[in-house]
Amino acid sequence: MENFNILVVDDEPGIRAGIRRVLRKFTVDYPFMDDEFGFTVEEASTGEEAIENLKEATPDIILLDNKLPGIQGIDVLEYINENQIDAYVVMITSYASLDLAVKATKHGAFDFVPKPFTPQELRSSMENVSKQLFLKRMTAKMHKEGKQIRFQFLSLLSHELKAPLTAVEGYLRMMQEKSAGENIDDYMKMITRSLDRIQGMRNMIMDLLDLTKLESEKKQRSIEQCNLTQLADNALATMQPFAIQKDVELILDAPENVKLTADPEEIEIILNNLISNGIKYNKTHGKVILKLEENEHNVKIIVEDTGFGISDEDQKQLFKEFVRIKNDKTKHISGSGLGLSIVKRITDNYQAKISVKSEIEKGSVFCITFLKT
């Protein structure tokens, strides 16, 4: 079990002893953590003593009372900010002061707990800050190990999920409070918008899972002779609800039993990404046609749509990581910017060739050619 180090800065011995007692056997454990985290507690009774301690070592968390003899807690917070001390500060406030809260927040305070506080209030604050500490350590470790793509994706994921979650929560609360009346029809716009947001979040999560599969050093590729026609049929069935929602028709044009030597999971990732894009960037009453072609030399996967099309300039950027094509037609469509880069990485593993032809307002055609071995 690892520990987070806490520096408690408070002039009341009873408060310091109470914090030590509450956190002595308290641990934090989230599903995404490999192990539990406990807490070790150091104490300072004045702001001056706290600053001396900070010169010697940097704790993970600082529990900082504002009302101290000598320099005040806000002065200690200013010192922490000016010296760029990398610690999460939780202010202990004995009275409600908007001015203090604003000033403390500007100087980097992460959270506030009231004084006096209950054991549960303290534990809740420590759980919150511990989660942030763990995620910060994880992203720093990935960055240090050269996993910059994961670091970027986690940053993007947290940003992209925050807004839709807030929106969906807002719509649900409006429905819970019946703010638009008793008639369910009055809420259809809210429900539709919520479903759109959820679909966007689902796409983000699927990209994260696909990326994890490709990046995982433990993953063993399962190369076998696949029934590509069956995989294509399954992919279209998976995307059918999304297509119905967007009023897009899905069509399979393929021989009955096309064979391809590959990892079925990787082919599913390719198909799901290309079909999903074909639906997402399509027009109302549009079509996505999935074609499979086979001859003695190669096997082709072709995905054709009747969507907005992609300019020649944007086509040059398509397969780069975190690239999202934005224009008046697509600016409101959510996405991670990773889907096509993931497809490109998989096709490269097979020495396959991927190409795109597109015309604005008429649609796009993606073609992947696998050489037979």
Image (spheres, grey):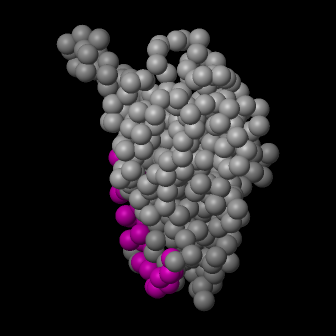
Front in this rendered view, residue 296 or 311: 311
Name the quadrant containing residue 73: top right
- Does residue 242 appear in this view? no
250 displayed left or right of 156: left
Front in this rendered view, residue 216 or 82: 82
Vertical relation: 323 (above or below) 66: below
- Residue at x 77%, y 32% (from the top left corner): 82
364 displayed left or right of 279: right
- Residue at x 64%, y 76% (from the top left corner): 349
Q: Magenta stretch: dominant SS?
A: helix
- Residue at x 37%, y 44% (from the top left corner): 21
Q: Is 338 part of what is drawn in magenta?
A: no
Could you tell me residue 11's position as x and y percent? 53, 29
From which residue to which does the magenta span run?
Answer: 219-242
Could you tell me residue 286's position as x and y percent? 49, 41
Could you tell me residue 332's position as x and y percent? 57, 31
- Residue at x 33%, y 31% (from the top left corner): 118
Name the quadrant containing residue 354: bottom right
